[in-house]
Image (spheres, rainbow, N blue to C red):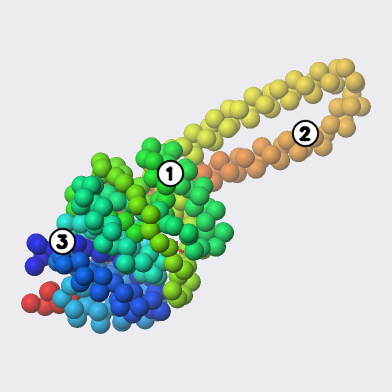
Amino acid sequence: MADNVQITVVIPVYNEEKNLTVLYDRLVPVMQGLGKSYEIIFIDDGSLDNSLVILKKFAAEEQIKVVELTRNYGQHAAIMAGFSVSCGKIIITMDADLQNPPEEIPELIRVMEEGNYDVVGTIRKGRRDSFFRIFPSKIINIVARKITGVKMHDWGCMLRAYRRKVVERMISCHEHATFIPALATVFGKRITEIEVEHEERHGGKSNYPLRKLINLQFDLVASFSDFPIKLIMYGGIFLSLLGVCFGIVLAVARLAYGAVWAAEGVFTLFAILFVFVGLQFFALGVLGEYIGRIYMEVRKRPEYVIEDVHSEKGKE
Ligand code: UDP
Ligand code: MG
């Protein structure tokens, strides 16, 4: 059976107990309607609620595998863990909160097969998220387009389809802090995008507070470029030049207007100083971010650890 699976759906799950049953009820008929062999892989990313209990019940079905991770490794590492046990020729990723309607899957597959694409990305039509979630996404989409050089419009939507070879190449790369849609652009040649519906989260709340969101976006930028460091470097050079110019202006003005004027300029100098001090801290922060990542990388800790794989097939 494992060898002839045509479609694999990979779904990372972190505290989604409110959504899993509805997801299952919508996803399974869609998969059955495809008329192709399929498997659904749920990855329990160290959920603290009842998600794993619900998932284990699903695993009684032959087409469903549940990967249990030892703790919370994050959405992208969880997907990688799912990839590592997948068998399908086409692999679909999607979220568990029903923001990505399962009903879009047949269209993804159709486009991939007809166009012989390696990766089919998606653009969320009428995105149902708060302004605070959409605005950072807009910025990151622009940045991602620039640094990867791939003209994709929506990097954040995880409802995507990948060919087996792309997934295998991604697995073999053993990278920490990955951002899968961006990584796939390195390993896939023929890439396209289609529009898909976007729904409100069915239940529970987003797992991405601002802190995690910033971290994820940094994963995307830092794993593809040293742009932030360059920015600091060029910014530093520019600001130093500006500082020198200020110094010259102040010196000239002091000569022209005398010491009284210069003393009154003390506060301006302080203001400038504060700007510089702030920038230095910012620069240190960026450097720290990189050093932290190097530290993670040299420790060679596994990207994820699979505790167990629950499936009917395994029991044979
Ligand atoms: N997720 C995960 N591990 C995490 C955070 C999220 O597996 O540490 C899963 C989550 O269960 C969902 C998907 O990743 O299936 C997207 O998460 P969420 O809906 O919270 O993100 P948002 O839609 O707010 O970007
Ligand atoms: Mg969501």
Tell whether 260 sits left or right of 313.
right
Q: Quadrant of ligand 1?
A: bottom left
Q: Position of residue 56 (x, y in %)?
A: 26, 79
Quadrant of res 32: bottom left
Instruction: Judge depth for marks 3 and 1 and give the one in front.
Output: 3
Quadrant of res 315: bottom left
- Which residue position is annotated with label 1? 144
Q: Are there few (<14), some (14-19), or many (20+) residues within 10 Å of tag 3?
A: some
Instruction: Judge depth for marks 1 and 2 and give the one in front.
Output: 1
Please say whether residue 94 is visible from this viewpoint.
Answer: yes
- Sequence-wise, the earlier of marks 3 and 1 is 3
The disc label shown at residue 254, or none: none
Q: Could you tell me the amino acid type at mark 2?
A: Leu
Please say whether residue 219 is visible from this viewpoint.
Answer: no
Q: Position of residue 63 (x, y in %)?
A: 18, 72
- Which residue position is annotated with label 2? 269
**Residue visible at 16% across and 56% down?**
89
- Which residue position is annotated with label 3? 6
| Mark 1 secondary-structure assignment | helix
Q: Are there few (<14), some (14-19), or many (20+) residues within 10 Å of tag 1?
A: many
**Residue visible at 41% across and 79% down?**
18
**Residue visible at 65% across and 43% down?**
278
Distance of mark 3 from mark 1, alpha carbons?
Answer: 31 Å
Q: Nearer the viewer, residue 234 or 202?
A: 202
Q: Could you tell me the amino acid type at mark 1?
A: Ala
- Sequence-wise, the earlier of marks 1 and 2 is 1
Q: Quadrant of the C terminus?
A: bottom left
Residue 153 to residue 17: above or below: above
